[in-house]
Amino acid sequence: MCAIVNDYQPPAAGQANPPSKECALGSRSRAFFDQLLTTHNIARGYFNSQHDRCYCDYCYNLSMPDVIVAGPTQYIVPRGWYRFGIDVPRGLAQQEDIFRKWSVSFHGTRAYLLKSLLSNGLAMPGDKLLDGSILASHNCAGRQDHCIYTSPTIRYAGLGFYTSITEFSFNGQNLVGQTVLQCRQQPGTYRMQGETMGFRSRWNQQVLCLALPDQSQVEWTTEVRAGVVPYGLLVRVFEPGSLPDHFESPVDNGRFEHIKRAALPGVAGGVGVAAARGLGARRGQGD
């Protein structure tokens, strides 16, 4: 049974300790973050380090709750991930009281789209991005669903099928990173539905997240852009050759075999943009 506590410390719901300098995940995550900003020309002004949080076992130990009351729905803590705080406009936060009244959700994305998402907010298929390109939906069987997909649990939004897989180098070691946006989402503007990945039909897996009381609510969809406000960039970093928990899905079709075999090429030059573009996206978000 997951513990539930009240917490209204905006935007650091979860009461994770500030990142420790002794934390291995923190060091790797900061290196990944720095390379993301450099490679994709993202301004540091979008971020506020006061709201950085690490959810590794060292900084957020196992005695701390998995589920927190933070708004109208439960906040499922993103264990194993590291959050870089995003500055939310103070007027919006105060006017809508989003850290008390809005739900926590997660939106997996590809690294090279972060700049546009941070500038314009979450986008839908058909939207024109800052570089002039038109956003297309991926992993939707050819559909261009005009909506944004999120999830109340990162165990679903953080699947490899839904996020970018980005190669990078840290202290001469090849590593892999993922990116997910942590958001506040306005109640009444989204619909809930069950998973559509085939976990039940293909893998006979009935429960995707033990902390989620109703598995029929694991996907959220909305057509209201302004109702989804990112307040953190979550990253997960791991070594090739060993996939983390809650990464694989029934529809991967072997796309991550090269990671399992630890066959990643050297990437001393920085973040692998080609890999970021080619290896998966959160379905239906258009990114």
Image (tube, rainbow, N blue to C red):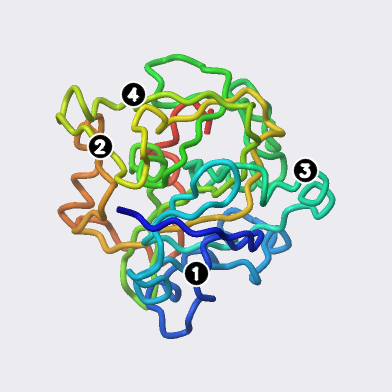
Q: Which residue is mark 2?
A: 207
137 relative to 89, above or below: above
119 relative to 150, above or below: below
Single out the mark in the foreground, 4 or 3: 3
- In the image, what residue occupies the spot 64% across and 48% down? 115
214 relative to 243, above or below: above
Residue 73 on image: x %, y %: 53, 42
Q: Secondary structure at mark 4?
A: loop
- In the image, what residue occupies the spot 46% across and 37% down? 151
- Outermost bottom residue: 22
| Lateral position of residue 122 relative to residue 260, left or right | right
Residue 261 appears in view: yes
Q: Which residue is mark 1?
A: 16
Q: Point out which mark residue 196 bears.
A: 4
Q: Nearer the viewer, residue 241 or 278?
A: 241
Residue 67 on image: x %, y %: 43, 54
Of the two numbered discs 3 and 2 on the same chain, state the one appearing first in sequence: 3
Q: Amino acid at mark 2?
A: Val
Q: CA distance from mark 2 to mark 4?
A: 13 Å
Q: Residues within 10 Å of mark 3 (few under 14, many from 20)?
A: few
Q: Point out which mark residue 96 bears.
A: 3
Residue 48 on image: x %, y %: 68, 66
- Outermost top residue: 143
Of the two numbered discs 1 and 2 on the same chain, state the one appearing first in sequence: 1
- In the image, what residue occupies the spot 41% across and 70% down? 60
Q: Is disc 2 in contact with disc 4, using a CB cutoff of under 8 Å?
A: no
Residue 275 appears in view: no
Of the two numbered discs 1 and 4 on the same chain, state the one appearing first in sequence: 1
Q: CA distance from mark 3 to mark 1?
A: 24 Å
Of the two numbered discs 4 and 3 on the same chain, state the one appearing first in sequence: 3
